[in-house]
Amino acid sequence: MNQLIWFRNDLRPYDNTALCRAFDAASHKGSVVKALFIATPGQWQRHHMAPIKQNLIQRAVSELSSSLRAIGVQLDVLTVNYYEQIPEHLVSYCRQQAISGIHANREYLINEIDRDQAVSTTGIPCHFYNDALLVPPENICNQSGQPYKVFTAFSKAWLSRIIHDLPTIQLLPEQTAIAGNNPIPSFAPEISEQLQYQLALWPSSADRALQALTRFTDSDSQSSVYDYHKSRDYPNLDATSRLSSAISIGLISVRQCLQQLLSKHGDACWDKSTGPGCWLNELIWREFYQHIAYHFPRVVRGQAFKEETDNIPWLYDDDRLKAWKHGLTGYPIIDAGMRQLSQTGWMHNRLRMLTASFLVKDLHLDWRLGEQHFMENLIDGDFAANNGGWQWAASTGTDAAPYFRVFNPTTQSRRFDPQGRFIRSFVPELSQCDSNEIYEPVRRDNYPPPVVNHNQARAEFISVFQNIQEQKNKQE
């Protein structure tokens, strides 16, 4: 009887808990390890997964298949539309392959939890492991035994656990390669040639992801983690790790990221005023949002974390929404960011904050519209991080920006795009503007006038939010 490793968002042969445990179980039982990936294009569409991300998964599964053959494991791929169809197909596969145990790494969102519970009732022994997070959601709570709702307190508790119990990289025993090639069926939708080109720029294998991590964490390399705290907010610079897509589908583990940071930068990792500490802080934010989605499933169901903000009377204006999506708002930095998203399948994090703030606090549109649009286009789309970021920007979420904090697009672009180089790269209509006027929302030939007046829109949003806050205070 054989053991099965069921790959999901952990498409790597290295430091993979479920894969290691499958080998352990197989060695004790004198059996072999089989591997399976189940593509669910219908479910991905329900979850608004970007076509470019589906294509990244397609490439990653193919790369994983080759890597697994080098350690004696054949990867099979099943395609079913929805999660609810998985138990039936999985049971049939396990019978055909004489599987006596399923090993998989936990996922922490509602649909994935329900999927795994359904599989657990099929009669085949299932083993689910904590692997995607450095600290599982159940393992951090405040003195009252409740999950943290504020990042600063969460971060302190998280760091305390990590410092006293550093996670270790898990190694597989040596295995014998198997010959031949197992063709991977196509399950990803077609994308444009432009996005195909962009896709090739991102790691699609565990080896390439590790190489990218090594380059980024080397203190003497260009655009390294050493200067991350100084340069990460400037979209014209190639100063971020570009590992977000690899982390989102598990080409690399967060343990590997932490190990590289510690081995190369030591105690600087614990100081967020340094580059390594600043990047580690971003990884902690990722874990925080995963914990929030697990403990407060209302956010997964499309509801605001702050319940009173579900009463905000959002506008529903298709013209405003289209202008935002297509980068035609008349605000250069906003339009440049939105065009970067549509043309490359990725957006710089500073611009994610600016464009999100603009949709909600300038255009007065429901943050959920923006959340969905980002997921439909981002190669690194991750529900918990995306939802957390949007609710932060909209002042509806945990640890959110105060409602009266409204980014000024002109001020922000002057600060983070000196000389307007990023704007010029994505808004060619403004390429001839000098550095003093390129930030301003004024009408020019072939470029639209500003869709709203920022100062007026800001005042209107704050007034609406103040009313919501006053109503809450009266109820309390």
Image (cartoon, helix red, strand yellow):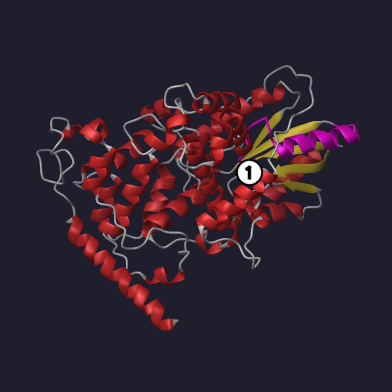
Specify whether residue 83 is painted magenta.
Answer: no
The foreground one among 61 and 406 is: 406
The local secondary structure at tag 1 comes to loop
Specify whether residue 20 is painted magenta.
Answer: yes
Left or right of residue 27, residue 46 in this image: left
Q: So how many labels did they put on this image?
A: 1
Residue 381 placement (x, y as % from top left): 47, 43
Residue 306 vertical position relative to residue 390 in the rendered view, above or below: below
Q: Which residue is mark 1?
A: 132
Left or right of residue 400, residue 44 in this image: right
Task: Kindly tell me whether residue 345 is visible in this rendering.
Answer: no
Q: Residue at x 24, y 31 (%)?
A: 421
Quarter of the picture containing the N terminus is top right
Quarter of the picture containing the C terminus is bottom left
Task: Kindly tell me whether residue 154 is visible in this rendering.
Answer: yes
> Where, by quadrant of the figure, is residue 228 drawn?
top left
Q: Badge 1 local density, few (<14 within 10 Å), some, or many (20+)?
A: many
Left or right of residue 91, residue 298 in this image: left
> Where, by quadrant of the figure, is residue 165 drawn?
top right
Q: Which residues are magenta?
A: 8-31
What's the residue type where badge 1 is placed? Ala
Q: Residue at x 36, y 48 (%)?
A: 353
Residue 55 placement (x, y as % from top left): 50, 33
Residue 89 vertical position relative to residue 26 in the rendered view, above or below: below
Q: Residue at x 34, y 30 (%)?
A: 237
The foreground one among 251 and 438 is: 438
Residue 447 placement (x, y as % from top left): 15, 41
> Where, by quadrant of the figure, is residue 364 drawn?
bottom left
Residue 334 vertical position relative to residue 121 in the rendered view, above or below: above
Residue 372 placement (x, y as % from top left): 41, 51
